[in-house]
Image: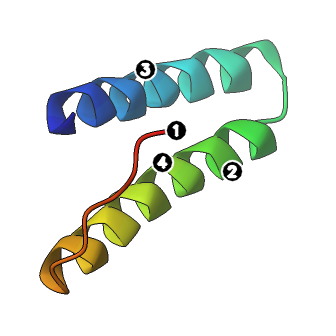
Amino acid sequence: MKLRKKRWLRALEIAKILFEDQGFFTDYLCEIETFIKGEDNETKKMQKHGEKRQKV
């Protein structure tokens, strides 16, 4: 799962570069990046407290 998140974040970085180059806004991509990073932090907190995250 960690590798998948790294790939998602890398893809978002590439997308941001391309969007900026074409003159598009990257706000939505930044929100997605924050969401992905936030999920990672939430998972770490849950693991720290001994909780297991349920898959949806």
Q: Earlier in the sequence, mark 3 or mark 4?
A: 3
Crowdedness of circle 3 by 10 Å Cα count: few (<14), some, many (20+)?
few
Q: Mark 3 or mark 4: which is in front?
A: 4
Give the mark nearest the N terminus, 3 or 1. 3
Which of discs 3 and 1 lies nearer the camera? The answer is: 1
The answer to which of marks 1 and 2 sits earlier in the sequence is 2
Res 31 label = 2
Q: Mark 3 = which residue?
A: 11
Query: Which residue is found at the position 50% from the left and 28% from the top?
Result: 12
Q: Is residue 41 or residue 17 the one in the foreground?
A: 41
The amino acid on which the numbered mark 2 sits, given as a three-letter code, is: Glu
Cα separation between marks 3 and 1: 24 Å
Secondary structure of residue under mark 2: helix
Q: Label 4 neighbourhood size at 10 Å, few (<14), some (14-19), many (20+)?
A: some
Q: Which comes sooner in the sequence, label 2 or label 3?
A: 3
Tag 4 residue: 36
The residue carrying mark 1 is: 56
Q: Is there CB contact under 8 Å for labels 4 and 1?
A: no
How far apart, in angstroms, are the residues tagged by discs 2 and 4? 9 Å
- In the image, 26: left or right of 37? right
Q: Evaluate if marks 1 and 2 touch, with contact meaning CB atoms under 8 Å apart.
A: no
* Residue at the (84%, 24%) spot, across then down: 24
User: Where does residue 17 sit, x and y in percent of width and height?
Assistant: 56, 24
Q: Residue at x 46, y 30 (%)?
A: 13
x, y percent for residue 27: 78, 45
* Mark in front: 1 vs 2: 1
Marks 3 and 4, how far apart at CA: 12 Å
